[in-house]
Amino acid sequence: MGKYICEPCGYVYDPELGDPDNGVDPGTAFKDLSEEWVCPICGAGQDMFVSE
């Protein structure tokens, strides 16, 4: 699973780590994130992320 970078702020979503602070378990692939999940830093939608 590759990492995804938020273009506006540079936050890196790493599927191996997930986003536990926002209810995303480690091992959750980017494609499996809920539609409600947004960048925890700047609030950008998933469409603003690019694969690393």
Image (cartoon, rainbow, N blue to C red):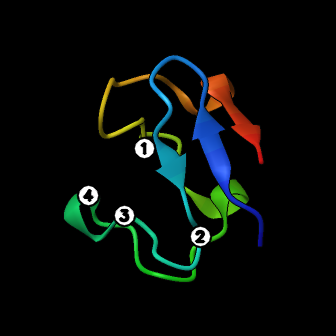
State the SS at label 2: loop
- Amino acid type of the residue tagged 4 in the rendering: Asn
Please tell me whether residue 4 is drawn above or below residue 42 in the rendered image. Answer: below
Q: Which residue is mark 2?
A: 15
- Amino acid type of the residue tagged 1 in the rendering: Trp
Q: Position of residue 34 (x, y in %)?
A: 51, 52
Which of the two discs, 4 and 1, labels the residue nearer the N terminus?
A: 4
- Disc 4 crowd, CA 10 A, few/some/many (<14, 14-19, 20+): few
Which of the two discs, 3 and 1, labels the residue nearer the N terminus?
A: 3
Relative horizontal placement of residue 25, taking residue 14 as reference (left or right): left
> Where residue 37 is drawn, which disc sits there?
1
CB contact under 8 Å: marks 4 and 1: yes
- Amino acid type of the residue tagged 2 in the rendering: Pro
CB contact under 8 Å: marks 4 and 3: yes
State the SS at label 1: loop
Q: Which residue is mark 4?
A: 22
- Amino acid type of the residue tagged 3 in the rendering: Asp
Q: Which residue is mark 3?
A: 19
Q: Position of residue 21 (x, y in %)?
A: 21, 63
State the SS at label 3: loop
Q: CA distance from mark 4 to mark 1?
A: 8 Å
In the current view of this chain or complex, which residue is farthest to the left?
A: 21
Quadrant location of the N terminus?
A: bottom right
Most foreground residue, 51 or 30: 51
Which dot, 3 or 1, sits closer to the camera? Answer: 3
Q: CA distance from mark 4 to mark 3?
A: 6 Å
Which residue shows up at 42% across the image and 36% down it? 38
Which of the two discs, 2 and 1, labels the residue nearer the N terminus?
A: 2
Please tell me whether residue 10 is drawn above or below residue 23 in the rendered image. Answer: above
Please tell me whether residue 5 is drawn above or below residue 12 in the rendered image. Answer: above
Q: CA distance from mark 3 to mark 2?
A: 8 Å
